[in-house]
Image (cartoon, helix red, strand yellow):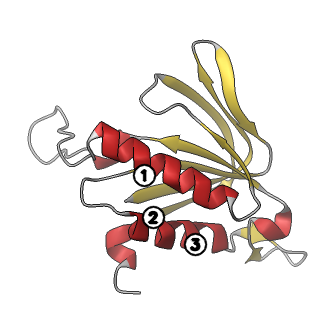
Amino acid sequence: MRFVIQRVTHASVTVDSKIVGKIEKGFLVLIGIENDDTEKIADKMVLKMTGLRIFEDEAGKMNLSLKQVNGSLLLISQFTLYADCRKGNRPSFIGAGKPEMANCLYEYIIEKCKEQDLQVEQGIFGADMKVELLNDGPVTILLDSHELAGN
């Protein structure tokens, strides 16, 4: 599982010219799921993401978490995070999770985030989405479940 976390001052996602999710200060999170991912992996990823202290405190140091700044989440599924570009110029997406399984895990992640009393907005799984954001910093963090596995 991969999460691309962008600290934003605002972000939105549009489908068919209609805004389906919108946040102010918080994280825009692009979520990639592979076939071997599980709810246990998702739990670990959600806890790590929501606990990240990447908002500035009064001293200007990245020291505050999403909850501490009353931030929100905009969660977007993105199978292209598993693009394999090793051969040729056309990426292969064979490593991305099968749609039905990936959608179930995506919905599970959304519910786990909501359980933490966070404002959670989302895109529409499998839709052609237009995402707008203002990256704050810029701060972008990549969480990969394979890298977290040893922790």
Residue bearing mark 3: 47
Residue 105, which numbered label? 1
Which amino acid, mark 3? Leu
Does 55 appear above or below 101?
below
Does 4 appear above or below 53?
above
Disc 1 and disc 2: Cα gap in Å?
A: 7 Å
Name the outermost residue toward the right.
58
Name the outermost residue toward the top.
17
Residue 21, which numbered label? none
**103 on left or right of 139:** left
**28 on left or right of 37:** right
Tell me the quadrant of the picture where the N terminus can be found: bottom left
**25 on left or right of 134:** right
Q: Specify which label sits upstream in the sequence, 3 or 2.
A: 2
> Can residue 82 be seen at all in this image of the molecule?
yes
Q: Closer to us: mark 3 or mark 1? A: 1
Identify which residue is drawn at 35% across, 63% down.
38
Image quadrant in which you'd find residue 87: top left
Tags 1 and 2 touching, CB below 8 Å: yes
Q: Specify which label sits upstream in the sequence, 3 or 1.
A: 3
Please tell me which residue lies in front, 127 or 29: 127
Identify which residue is drawn at 42% across, 41% down.
78
x, y (%) of residue 130? 55, 25
